[in-house]
Image (spheres, rainbow, N blue to C red):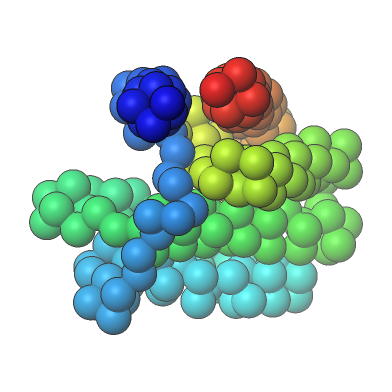
Amino acid sequence: MRSLLHHKTYLKYNNIMALKAPVHQFTETRSIQITRQHFFYVSNILSVSRLGTVPFIFYFIYRAQWVFAIVCGGVAVVTDLLDGFFARRLKQHSELGYILDPVADKLAIFAGIFALVLSKSTFPLWAFGIIVTRDVLIVLGNAVLAYKAKMITRSNLWGKGTSFFLSIAVMFYLLRPIMPLLPNNIEFYSLCFALVFVGISTLSYAHHMFRVLEETRVN
């Protein structure tokens, strides 16, 4: 009986790992280990610095100080690109980084679009609603996963693409007031392109979450 139970547990673990392995999609909450050294990783310092831009992004956009807003937004975009590069180059992957990176992305983008909506720019309210709804669903999905499967999702390729293209769209909205000669509606078209990634990433996360929950239930 003990051998059979051990075998079932082994199969369950392998089935779950099989879902995780191809895209490194999940982190087991029981295995999360954050040490003091992780805070000094270059990639994590960049993520923390991106978090530091969040209140400034909101303030400068809300006050219509477009140049300062663009500088802060540019810093956020560049640090987002560099943190992953340094994590791979210096082999500084950590559980802290897996948490900090998407949180910094979401907060910086939310600060930007929320300030744009409050400042009565041309940023559409319905797009703001779609983006916020997507993030809320991911947070709720992670809460369910953490409770039922002891796992949380990591940001995948679609999620990173979503953050990048939303950032570019926000930058175009910031540039419009000081660069009226930009191509007509480029900010809206870039936003629509980003929203395609919003939809695909939502489906991607949901697909993987439901697979893990189903696998957990069956086993």
Residues 134 and 31: in front is 31
Asked which quadrant contains residue 11, the reply is top left
The quadrant in which the C terminus is found is: top right
The image position of residue 6, as x and y in percent, is 37, 30
Residues 91 and 104: in front is 91
Residues 70 and 80: in front is 80
Asked which quadrant contains residue 5, the reply is top left
Asked which quadrant contains residue 183, the reply is top right
Extreme-front residue of the structure: 1
Residue 162 falls left or right of residue 59: left
The image position of residue 178, as x and y in percent, is 62, 57
Extreme-bottom residue of the structure: 36
Query: Is residue 138 visible from the viewing direction of this image?
Result: no
Residues 13 and 200: in front is 13
Circle count: 0
Task: Look at 45% across and 55% down and name the residue there.
Answer: 30
Task: Look at 59% across and 70% down and name the residue there.
Answer: 54
The image position of residue 86, as x and y in percent, is 20, 55
The quadrant in which the N terminus is found is: top left
Extreme-left residue of the structure: 90
Q: Is residue 117 above or below residue 167?
A: below
Task: Look at 29% across and 80% down and name the residue there.
Answer: 36
Residue 84 falls left or right of residue 49: left
Task: Look at 52% across and 44% down and name the residue there.
Answer: 151
The image position of residue 199, as x and y in percent, is 67, 24
Q: Is residue 210 above or below residue 75?
A: above
Query: Is residue 119 visible from the viewing direction of this image?
Result: yes
